[in-house]
Amino acid sequence: MRDTSRPVPFARASRAVFDLALEGMVWSRRSLLMAVLLGLPIVFAIVYRVVLAAHIPPRVTPFDLYGAVVVFYYLRNVLPLAALFYASALIADEVEGKTLTYLLTRPVRREAILAGKFAAYVATTLSLALPAVVVTFFILLTSRGRVGLGGAVPDLLRDLGVLALALLAYGALFTLLGVLLKRPVIPGLLFLFVWELIANLPGYLPRFTLTAYLRSLVRHRPAEEGISEIFGQVLPAALCLEVLAGAIIVCLAAAAWIFSTREYVMDQ
């Protein structure tokens, strides 16, 4: 008979929490909404291929459109929103629903609970986002034939890596926010659509945003006047990877420490 006074091993506990959290995330209204938002570029790509391709000037290539979708739709807006609405709720939803007690009374380390839930968030968002990007890429880039498709695939693979890194970075930050605050959504929205805008400013300030580092990792650089200025500051790739990895580690470590030491009192 297992000694119930000892906590379940970390890996086994994390896997159990992961399985439980993943089922709840996949079959939720939040996932339905995110699936619609993440899949909208596929609809745009189909409309472009069927209707718009013949009317858009030849200088605007399908690869240009794909790059704009990646940078301005996914990387800047929808993926950070997905991270906010999923990751900030990992603990906050349990507290609001008064179900956290059922987890905390089990012989499971709190760090394992957070790790399992964060892994479920990553699995859910990656499975929703990355296939949508791949489908959009192939629909757009085959609209005028397959010429150049093979040469663009490395950019697709790089983009998928950057988008996955964005989900990890924003997810770690909003997990910390969800542990710190009872209602983290409004502060998270202010961070995304107020603070992160300084990534578009000249000087040193953009280095205090996640957007500047993530955007520097993609190769899409629009040439149009007024848009190209946004990409005026491109940071070294090695620096971007170091800063983003550090941010992920620090945010998750801080969230785990706060969650493991905080006393939670459920309102009756």
Image: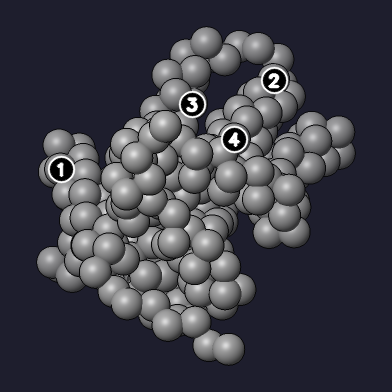
Camera-nearest residue between 28 and 113: 113
Image position, residue 214 (x, y; %): 32, 48
Decide which of tag 1 and tag 3 comes sooner along the chain: 3
> Disc 4 marks which amino acid?
Ser
Alpha carbon distance from label 1 to label 4:
25 Å
- The residue carrying mark 3 is 156
Is mark 1 in CB contact (under 8 Å) with mark 2?
no
| Front residue (pair 178, 197) | 178
Residue found at the very far bottom of the displayed protein: 268
Q: Image point 24% across, 69% down: which residue?
A: 261
Residue, disc 4:
127
SS at circle 1: helix
Q: Position of residue 33 (x, y in %)?
A: 72, 57
Considering depth in this image, is 133 or 233 the residue closer to the camera? 133
Q: Is residue 94 visible?
A: yes
Amino acid at circle 3: Leu
- Decide if residue 192 is in sight here: no
**Real-space Cα distance between discs 1 and 2?**
36 Å
Asked if residue 71 is positioned above or below residue 103 in the image, the reply reads above
Numbered circle sitting on residue 242: 1
Name the front one of labels 1 and 4: 4
- Which of the two labelled residues, at mark 1 and mark 2, occupies the earlier sequence position? 2
Colour mapping used in the image = one colour
Q: Tags 2 and 4 in contact by the CB under 8 Å rule?
A: no
